[in-house]
Image (cartoon, helix red, strand yellow):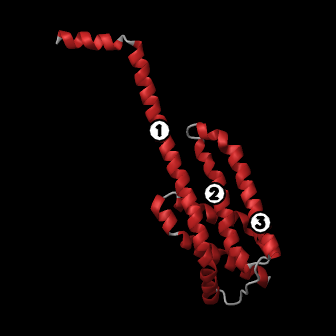
């Protein structure tokens, strides 16, 4: 027993071993945080690619919903130059938000605010995906002016589901269906007025 106690007290007094153990613990924590943040980035990149793939079929979903539930709503479609402008603006604002919020990456608990640019892009692309088929550019502007808050709340609900790793990606077509119902209903009211 005395040999073990002497060995332990010798280790406790050795500052080099204490420093090295601190370095090992710090490196382990940094590696875990790096892994988790990398996994989150990969997940959201996958979600973006998946949303583009689902976007190819979104027109089909939207037309089926419109024929069944909103037969009086006729599709106008946003002209390509306006669509490209809205898309470019959304991407530029997202990039600006990422630059603005990037210093928060290194602050624990505040780094969750990096989801704001991701949400912004998610919202803009989801709404634009449906609106580009249904609305003209002027109608899109009017719908955003009148119902922008409701649209963001609906997108926030859908976005919160994307935080559940597997379910959030699998039900992306559901998001398109929900936003289609919302925008088609608001378009019907707008055109009747």
Q: Is residue 153 left or right of residue 36?
A: right
Could you say whether the residue bearing mark 2 is in a helix, strand or loop?
A: helix
Instruction: Give residue 42's position: percent from left, percent from top.
Output: 53, 54
Where does the N terminus fall, quadrant-wise?
A: top left
Numbered mark located on residue 167 in the image: none
Could you tell me how far apart the alpha carbons at marks 1 and 3 are, in whole angstroms? Answer: 39 Å
Residue assigned mark 3: 86
Numbered mark located on residue 119 in the image: 2
Residue assigned mark 1: 31
Q: Earlier in the sequence, mark 1 or mark 3?
A: 1
Does residue 178 appear in this view? no
In the rendered image of this protein, does residue 67 appear above or below residue 43?
below
Q: Earlier in the sequence, mark 3 or mark 2?
A: 3
Q: Is residue 46 left or right of residue 129?
A: left
The residue mark sitting in front, 1 or 2, is 1
Residue 67 lies in quadrant = bottom right
Instruction: Give residue 78's position: percent from left, percent from top.
Output: 77, 76
- Extreme residue in the left direction: 1
Could you say whether the residue bearing mark 1 is in a helix, strand or loop?
A: helix
Query: Residue 159 or 97: which is nearer the viewer?
Result: 97
Could you tell me how far apart the alpha carbons at marks 3 and 2 are, in whole angstroms? Answer: 16 Å
For the point 67% across and 59% down, the residue is 121
Instruction: Give residue 117's position: percent from left, percent from top.
Output: 66, 53
């Amino acid at each position: 027993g005395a040999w073990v106690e002497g060995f332990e007290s010798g280790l406790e007094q050795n500052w080099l071993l204490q420093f090295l153990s601190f370095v090992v613990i710090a490196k382990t924590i940094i590696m875990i945080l790096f892994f988790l943040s990398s996994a989150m980035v990969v997940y959201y990149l996958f979600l973006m690619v998946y949303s583009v793939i689902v976007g190819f079929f979104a027109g089909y979903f939207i037309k089926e919903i419109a024929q069944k539930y909103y037969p009086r709503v006729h599709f106008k479609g946003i002209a390509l130059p306006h669509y490209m402008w809205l898309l470019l603006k959304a991407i530029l604002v997202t990039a600006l938000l990422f630059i603005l919020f990037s210093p928060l990456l290194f602050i624990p608990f505040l780094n969750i605010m990096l989801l704001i640019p991701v949400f912004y892009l998610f919202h803009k692309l989801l709404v634009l995906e449906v609106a580009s088929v249904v609305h003209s550019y002027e109608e899109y502007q009017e719908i955003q002016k009148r119902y922008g808050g409701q649209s963001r709340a609906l997108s926030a609900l859908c976005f919160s589901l994307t935080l559940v790793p597997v379910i959030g990606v699998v039900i992306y077509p559901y998001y398109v269906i929900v936003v289609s119902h919302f925008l088609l209903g608001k378009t019907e009211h707008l055109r009747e007025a």
